[in-house]
Amino acid sequence: MKDVAQHAGVSTATVSRVLNGHAAPTPETRQRVLAAIEELGYRPNALARSLRTTSTQTLGLVISDLLNPFFAEIARAVEDEARSHGYCVVIGNADENAEQEATYVRTLLDRRVDGLLLCPANDDPALVREVSAGGVPLVLLDRTVREATCPVVRADGSEALTSLARRLVGAGHTRIGVIAGPQNTSTGRERTAVLTGALGGLAQVVHGDFRQESGSQAAARLIDDGATALVAMDNLMGLGALGEIRARGLRVPHDVALAVFDDQPWFSLLDPPITVVAQPTVEMGRAAARSLLALIDGRQPDDVRLTAKLVLRGSLGEAEL
Amino acid sequence: MKDVAQHAGVSTATVSRVLNGHAAPTPETRQRVLAAIEELGYRPNALARSLRTTSTQTLGLVISDLLNPFFAEIARAVEDEARSHGYCVVIGNADENAEQEATYVRTLLDRRVDGLLLCPANDDPALVREVSAGGVPLVLLDRTVREATCPVVRADGSEALTSLARRLVGAGHTRIGVIAGPQNTSTGRERTAVLTGALGGLAQVVHGDFRQESGSQAAARLIDDGATALVAMDNLMGLGALGEIRARGLRVPHDVALAVFDDQPWFSLLDPPITVVAQPTVEMGRAAARSLLALIDGRQPDDVRLTAKLVLRGSLGEAEL
DNA sequence: CATAGATGTGTAATCGATTAACTAGCGCAC
DNA sequence: GTGCGCTAGTTAATCGATTACACATCTATG
């Protein structure tokens, strides 16, 4: 910057003013400065700028699992929305691991992100408190924690799950296997509670960990126990369940009906296409980013509750009639 | 930091030494400082530190498309490897868009990442030159550019594609549709060249853009032209092609044989499971991160060329016998 | 014609760390 | 007791920007 100033025959203050579009500099000085910048190929050091201004124009996003397309879609939506407001997004991948999540959150705070979006790995409010204590704007996405004190953006699948339950019961299923998410995540608990509630005593629950492998194992257990219908509470466990079904040479929906929480583009390519509870991922991501930007802006955004929808495609068999 | 120093009754220099594990401070002073840090909940400002040390312990990764599971897997591998070396990764999503890619690269440079991993959206070496001119360590991943002057990490699919071609020809296919990637990407060009070369005059090529929609369109065109086998040059176009095949009520492999470049977990759940050319994504990501870290370390890593493998699963029909 | 006000630039403090150069304190040998 | 060598710790410069304040110049006004 000093070089640029010298080159243009002005002070660094003037260079800075030109860079930041202040009113002061004469059109003529401005031209000279811009020319010098161009000539020297100067690019301002964002670190120095941020140090001085205490603003990084950056949002942190800590997600549970980058390989889960559900979160990848959210990440992309967040990034889109942020970019359109002149913000950059730094993505941290927690791998469904609370410790790694905490590490990432701290790293991001150390780097002074202007705000943080978090898909918490579990219920524990400790990390959320830590962030809030630091005074950093925080929005929770998809999942919440106990006694959350910050805005939360999520999708409500109650209606879809209730309707799903009604159909399964109506079609005469009496042993319905629920491949549930971890008890210590809000989504895991809530979805399971709603579904089992609606199923009356017909539900058999096995808990997985939102990963493919646990889906296979849960499916195996449930099928062994005589389940004639399976509901997987996220797409990776759904993938695992489907693998197990195929491995046993069973037919969907003839031998076992299947529904999955979270939609995926390839679900409709299967035979039969998979019936899902589809969450509005893009809207969730965008809404979360907007809430966070509002918070950064000093406003107090409300919680956002979007609605997940039941999409019938055939994998429930008669229950879809 | 000043507060901590005061609290512990030492100077900021001493605090800094404790923080950085220097030899100087007495165990006793160290204790006092650590206690003060704990008590005040002090966290060092990474911006200030980086400004002073000119090192951010951060790698930039600009990928073509976050929604493409191939790149998501790579991103995860890069991140894993980087983390195990104490580095953080900032991911930028270029969305197969050269302009957005350039914007991201510049943003990352402005933030003084210690090194950059780039999956270039196209052939143009301008951006690579710009980065190199800035003296920032750079490694290209998956794709290369014209006259690249930096290390490149990629997978070689020639053997797999040649063997694939031989099988298709051997099984008597005479109109083989190739759903190719963009001409202005190295992977798009090379894969197509190898495959069409090996297919002799039997190939019909339609270019897509590595996205699902273009895969459907290309498939539609090729099927209309009488193709009895399709090869999609990346998994998203493969997804599109499969959708088109299903939409027309055609059977794989009876009506049309199908192979896809890039493997996906759900490919084996389809009926029939899809035959693919599988790239070693995790190894690619790790190798790229390692090369970049070596470069940052002042060493000169060689290019890495891993091998993609043909995985036969049934979607080629007789060609697999 | 002196002066108030507006306008454009420069000077220097500041953000929060690191670190070279220096100083104070201590022990030991002669 | 003096001097030398160590060690532990301090002072102050520095990284590269922003910005309050001071200053110079130029109009407009009474």
Image: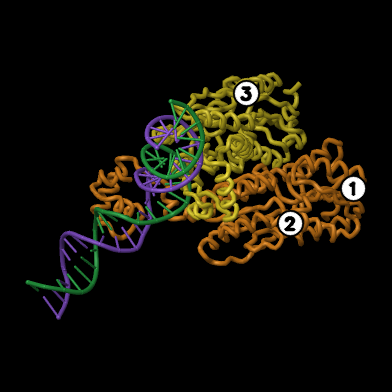
Chain colours: A orange, B yellow, C green, D purple
Horizontal arrangement in the rendering, residue B168 relative to residue A202 (left or right): left
Q: Which residue is mark 1?
A: A227
Gap between marks 1 and 2, in whole Å?
Answer: 26 Å
Q: Residue at x 57, y 51 (%)?
A: B37
The amino acid at mark 3 is: Thr
Q: Is residue B294 visible?
A: yes
- Image quadrant in which the N terminus of chain A is located: top left
Residue A263 versus residue A296 in the image, above or below: above
Q: Position of residue A203 (x, y in %)?
A: 88, 54
At label 1, the amino acid type is: Ala
Q: Nearer the viewer, residue B283 or A165?
A: B283
> Label 3, label 2: how many angstroms apart (C-alpha)?
43 Å
Crowding around mark 1 (Cα neighbors within 10 Å: few <14, some 14 to 19, many 20+) is: many
Direction from residue A145 to residue A215 in the image, left or right: right
The circle drawn on residue A186 is 2
- Chain hosting mark 1: A
- Residue tagged 3: B307
Mark 1 and mark 2 residues within 8 Å of each other at the beta carbon: no
- The amino acid at mark 2 is Ser
Instruction: Verify CB contact (< 8 Å) between mark 3 and mark 1.
Output: no
The residue marked by circle 2 belongs to what chain?
Answer: A
Q: What SS does tag 1 mark?
A: loop
Q: Where residue A255 is drawn, which disc sits there?
A: none
